[in-house]
Amino acid sequence: MPTFGERLRATRREKGINQADFAGVVGISERALQNYETGEREPKISFVQVCAEKLGVSAAFLIGETEDPALVDDRDVSPQEAEFLKWVEDNLEGSFFYDFDKSPEDAKKHMMETLRLVWERERGRKPGQKQGE
């Protein structure tokens, strides 16, 4: 299965965008882009989203969750699912997603199922309320 870097490079080339131009569009150096494309550097989820937006593909495609590069219509995502995905992005961007991207597909699905359970318990908590209350 292609990595983020491989999909990023292939999609950028399909769109006819060279490295220097794309690096400028996403606000990084050309060397940093090379590092992402070769897999020497792992991206934060926010960077994946910026790349997906600029290339007109879904972030899910770039990270290998789907073979379909088409953007998902926001109307196809329930408000609850959108809330869950935002919670994941806001709370777990650091070390979790560094390892998540390298994980096999079955492990990714299991991790998302586990995170969904945690999110469902946490989303009803009021500010200042301790876990389990």
Image (cartoon, rainbow, N blue to C red):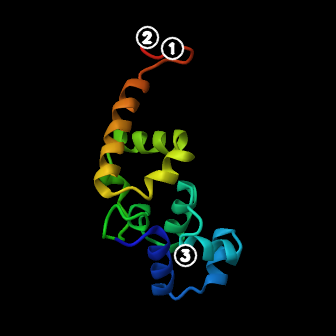
Residue closer to the observer: 62 or 76: 62
Q: Which mark is residue 133?
A: 2
Whether 18 is drawn above or below 66: the answer is below
Q: Which residue lies at the image location 41% right of the left edge and 65% below the top edge?
A: 58
The amino acid on which the numbered mark 1 sits, given as a three-letter code, is Lys
21 to the left or right of 89? right
Q: Which mark is residue 17?
A: none
28 to the left or right of 97? right
- For mark 2, does the 10 Å Cα neighbourhood hold few (<14), some (14 to 19), or many (20 or more) residues? few
Write down the residue under mark 3. 38
| C-alpha gap between disc 1 and disc 2 | 6 Å
Q: Where residue 80 sits: x, y (%)?
A: 35, 38
Tell me whether circle 1 and circle 3 mark residues in contact (CB < 8 Å).
no
Q: Which residue lies at the image location 38% right of the left edge and 24% below the top edge?
A: 121
The amino acid on which the numbered mark 2 sits, given as a three-letter code, is Glu
Residue closer to the observer: 75 or 133: 133
Whether 7 is drawn above or below 128: the answer is below
Write down the residue under mark 1. 130
SS at circle 2: loop
- For mark 3, does the 10 Å Cα neighbourhood hold few (<14), some (14 to 19), or many (20 or more) residues? some
Tell me whether circle 1 and circle 2 mark residues in contact (CB < 8 Å).
yes
Of labels 3 and 2, earlier in sequence is 3
Q: Where residue 57 sits: x, y (%)?
A: 43, 70
Of labels 1 and 3, earlier in sequence is 3
Q: Which residue lies at the image location 32% right of the left edge and 64% below the top edge?
A: 66
Residue closer to the observer: 103 or 86: 103
| C-alpha gap between disc 3 and disc 2 | 46 Å
Please tell me whether mark 1 or mark 3 is closer to you in this view: 3
Q: Quadrant of residue 102?
A: bottom left
The amino acid on which the numbered mark 3 sits, given as a three-letter code, is Thr
SS at circle 1: loop
